[in-house]
Image (spheres, grey):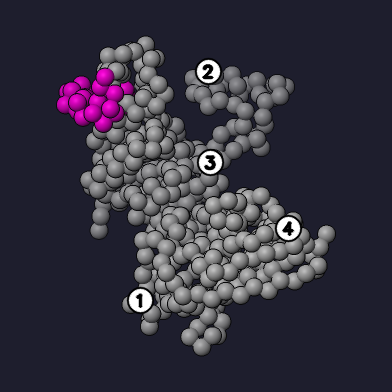
């Protein structure tokens, strides 16, 4: 069994709303205790507390790469700050075995009056690198940042992007046993972001233990076999990354399931027409309805569309994504040479019957799109529902996920009702 290098048990962190965290001498504590009954300064009382973390327990084995995902304010960064010993927990404890490196904020220790070369040594020292180590890696850092022409220029004359490139280059060349990374891939242009991702992938496959916080779920899926979903300071899911990221999408869209009212769902488009509801019906080999989809089964997708204004010839598409947001299945009316046309107040029910849905067991996201190709998006619901696919012993051998949209057999039908929903 692999050695546990990070052990977190019952960890909690509480902040008082409106008050900075500070450290008191004994005389300060005694003075505050003595004057507390007499203060009327309007400070928050005992019930004005925020728990950034509550009851977090987590074990990470040596060599594991674990993603931490969740909304802003969920407590991800607070957890890394506690593990980095930047702040102390209110409850519980954390044990770490090994040298820790933290990439919690790109640019730590940079000074705008110093040159790029001088900032490499300053930032590297603050991050825990010795001078000999920085000397040895200096050329690699400069090459990675691609700022060698401006290396002896004061940092204040660097563009923001150049500063971020140099800062990440320094941080990326740390060599700790345990690496804590907080949203450091969102730096520079697209080409440099890809370069950063490649560097992190190299680190991840070098046998180091990594805790990786990011809102870039594609990067999380690429780097982390295991992920942890944090909400409201608590761990709500811990498991394989595709399942955790799928759950994150679903919870963020309001907990959509196989039969969903879409009227309140997050969406984009002109609003001339909109998706009202979605129903998913997995079907067995004899057309019987299944309680859960299975690898290789048929899938009936039924969507209701209501027009608020005249809707010219339009295309309706149903798209299935994996947990990382990769498009796996795309079926639409144009593929059948069909289109949807509605007058204001009309409602249409569009059915797609997808034959032999070849998806491996897991959770998938269903998205909907309505519009005119390359000209107008009328309505787009990115996270309309979740599709659970269970294993089927007979179909397991054929259960695969293709690297992109695959061609599948499907049928469509449209039923339009007039006037029932007219305003």
The quadrant in which the C terminus is found is bottom right
Residue 131 on the magenta segment: yes
Callout 3: SS? loop
Seen at 22% across and 45% down, the residue is 206
- The numbered mark, 3 or 2, whose residue comes first in the sequence reads 2
Q: Position of residue 364 (x, y in %)?
A: 48, 63
Q: Main secondary structure of the magenta part?
A: helix
Q: Nearer the viewer, mark 2 or mark 1?
A: 1
Q: Position of residue 292 (x, y in %)?
A: 52, 75
- The numbered mark, 1 or 3, whose residue comes first in the sequence reads 3
Please give left or right for residue 382 compared with residue 103 in the image. right
> Are the residues tagged 2 and 1 within 8 Å (C-beta)?
no
Residue 318 on the magenta segment: no
To which residue does mark 4 refer? 310
Q: Nearer the viewer, residue 14 or 228?
A: 228
Please give left or right for residue 134 compared with residue 305 in the image. left
To which residue does mark 1 refer? 398
Which quarter of the figure has residue 352? bottom right
To which residue does mark 3 refer? 72
Dot 1 surroundings within 10 Å: few (below 14), some, or many (20 or more)? some
Q: Label 2 to label 4, Cα distance in Å?
A: 75 Å
Which residues make up the magenta segment? 121-149
Q: Nearer the viewer, residue 197 or 239?
A: 197
- The numbered mark, 2 or 4, whose residue comes first in the sequence reads 2
To which residue does mark 2 refer? 27
Q: Position of residue 166 (x, y in %)?
A: 32, 26
Dot 4 surroundings within 10 Å: few (below 14), some, or many (20 or more)? some
Q: Residue at the bottom extreme?
A: 286
Q: Position of residue 213 (x, y in %)?
A: 42, 43
């Amino acid at each position: 069994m692999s050695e546990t290098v990070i052990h977190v048990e019952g960890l909690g962190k509480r902040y008082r709303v409106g008050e900075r965290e500070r450290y008191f001498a004994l005389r300060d504590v005694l003075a505050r205790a003595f004057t507390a009954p007499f203060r009327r300064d309007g400070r928050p009382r005992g019930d004005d507390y925020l728990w950034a973390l509550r009851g977090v327990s987590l074990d990470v084995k040596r060599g594991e790469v674990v993603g931490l995902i969740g909304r802003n304010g969920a407590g991800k960064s607070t957890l890394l700050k506690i593990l980095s010993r930047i702040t102390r927990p209110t409850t519980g404890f954390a044990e770490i075995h090994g040298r820790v490196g933290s990439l919690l904020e790109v640019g730590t220790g940079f000074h705008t009056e110093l040159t790029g070369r001088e900032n490499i040594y300053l930032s590297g020292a603050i991050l825990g690198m010795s001078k000999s180590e920085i000397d040895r890696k200096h050329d690699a850092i400069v090459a990675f940042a691609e700022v060698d022409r401006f290396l002896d220029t004061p940092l204040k004359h660097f563009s923001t992007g150049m500063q971020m490139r140099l800062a990440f280059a320094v941080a990326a060349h740390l060599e700790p046993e345990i690496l804590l990374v907080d949203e450091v891939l969102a730096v520079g242009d697209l080409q440099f972001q890809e370069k950063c991702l490649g560097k992190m992938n190299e680190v991840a496959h070098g046998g180091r233990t990594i805790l990786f916080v990011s809102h870039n779920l594609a990067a999380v899926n690429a780097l982390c076999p295991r992920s942890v979903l944090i909400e409201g300071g608590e761990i709500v899911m811990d498991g394989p990354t595709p399942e955790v990221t799928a759950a994150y999408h679903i919870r963020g869209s309001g907990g959509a399931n196989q039969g969903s009212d879409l009227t309140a769902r997050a969406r984009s488009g002109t609003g001339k027409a909109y998706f009202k509801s979605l129903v998913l019906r997995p079907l067995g080999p004899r057309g019987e309805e299944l309680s859960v989809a299975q690898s290789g089964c048929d899938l009936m997708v039924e969507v209701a569309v209501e027009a608020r204004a005249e809707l010219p010839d339009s295309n309706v598409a149903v798209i299935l994504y994996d947990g990382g947001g990769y498009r796996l299945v795309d079926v639409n009316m144009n593929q059948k040479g069909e289109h949807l046309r509605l007058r204001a107040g009309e409602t249409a029910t569009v059915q797609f019957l997808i034959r032999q849905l070849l998806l491996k067991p897991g959770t998938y996201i269903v998205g909907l799109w309505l519009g005119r190709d390359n000209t107008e998006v009328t309505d787009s619901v990115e996270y309309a529902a979740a599709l659970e696919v269970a294993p089927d012993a007979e179909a397991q051998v054929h259960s695969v996920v293709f690297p992109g949209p695959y061609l599948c057999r499907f049928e469509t039908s449209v039923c339009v009702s007039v006037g029932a929903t007219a305003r």
